[in-house]
Amino acid sequence: MTEKVLLVDDEEEFVETLAERMRSRLVRCSVTVSFCLSQVL
Amino acid sequence: MKADADWQAIAREELRFFGNVSAAISHEINNRIAVINEKAGLLTDLSVMMAQGREIDVTRFEVQSRKIVEQVQLAKQTVRNLNRFAHSVDVMRTRIEAAEVLELVVALYARKAAAAEAVLSISESCEPVTITSSPFFLETLIGRAIDVALSRVDDARTVIIGVEATREGITVQFRGLTGLTEPIEFPEESQGVPALLECLGARYRSEPDGTALLLEIPDHERMSHGRTA
């Protein structure tokens, strides 16, 4: 699987935990903490 | 005597402020619930993996359990702040510890400050000062001042907030700003602020160099003593 998921949220602990769960399901993902999605994209 | 239009403007302003703060607090509580939910899910995932025979480091359980407790503590503090804020409408006028009101409003605005990529910091030299005033009106004026300060915070991205006693009452200072000019302009949705200032006999002004916003609030007890003397 080559797809990679970018998780964006204003709550670091939330996205980090979600990423940990996704990685345990072999989903590649990275995390960005931001209050504004348009700043990330 | 204040005109009905002024009282309506004040009522609208107060309702807006209550709504703004409630929305921010509910988002904060929702964040804590979302984190706890994910961590509970992670613990379940780890248990399932362990039952399937995968080797799981037991410290992962300990770390996540500890973090759930931390999130619960944060949520409890947020609810305590909301409770204090909600009860500030109980009395129209009382003796207030200014530093306590500052701490509460700064806590209520932490998320908004983070969204503005700034930090609110209470000055270490903050004096213990009391004032007789309306707790909720005072919180509103401090909150609206923080709104202005966050829109004018300088490159250090820290608004330093302090309070000092004056002959008439107190002055709350918001430092670390840049380019602030008079008259102080408020967002479109805060047009009831002038009527509220008039009601308390308070005023906003800026330092001549535009680096600080000052909120001057008279002590109503001193004012009434002054009138009877």
Image (cartoon, coloured by chain):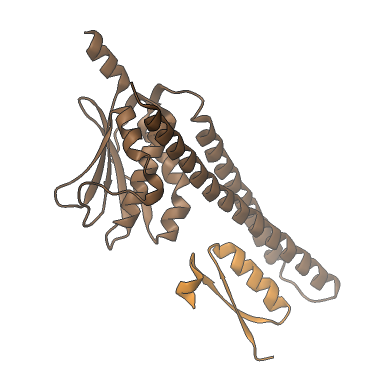
Is B188 on the left-hand or right-hand side of A3?
left
Instruction: Give the farthest residue toward the top.
Output: B229
**Residue B180: x and y, percent?**
22, 53
Q: Is residue B56 above or below residue B67?
A: below
Residue at 71% in and 70% down:
B57
Residue at 49% in and 38% down:
B15
In which quadrant will I find the C terminus of chain B? top left
Is B218 on the left-hand or right-hand side of B10?
left
The image quadrant that residue B131 belongs to is top left
Residue at 37% in and 31% down:
B6
In which quadrant will I find the N terminus of chain B? top left
Q: Nearer the viewer, residue B100 or B133?
A: B133
Q: Nearer the viewer, residue B22 or B177?
A: B22
Q: In this view, does A4 lie above or below B2?
A: below
**Residue B208: x and y, percent?**
14, 48
Q: Which of B5 and B173 is in front in this view?
A: B5
Q: In this view, does A4 lie above or below B100?
A: below
Instruction: Give the farthest residue toward the bottom.
Output: A2
**Residue A40: x and y, percent?**
48, 75
The image quadrant that residue B157 belongs to is bottom left
The hue of chain B in the figure is: brown
Q: Can residue B93 be seen in this view?
A: yes
The image quadrant that residue B177 belongs to is bottom left
Is A3 on the left-hand or right-hand side of B128?
right
**Residue B44: x and y, percent?**
78, 64
Q: Which of B47 and B148 is in front in this view?
A: B148
Residue at 25% in and 47% down:
B184
Report the number of numbered marks. Answer: 0
Q: Is residue B100 visible?
A: no
Instruction: Give the farthest residue toward the right.
Output: B52
The hue of chain A in the figure is: orange
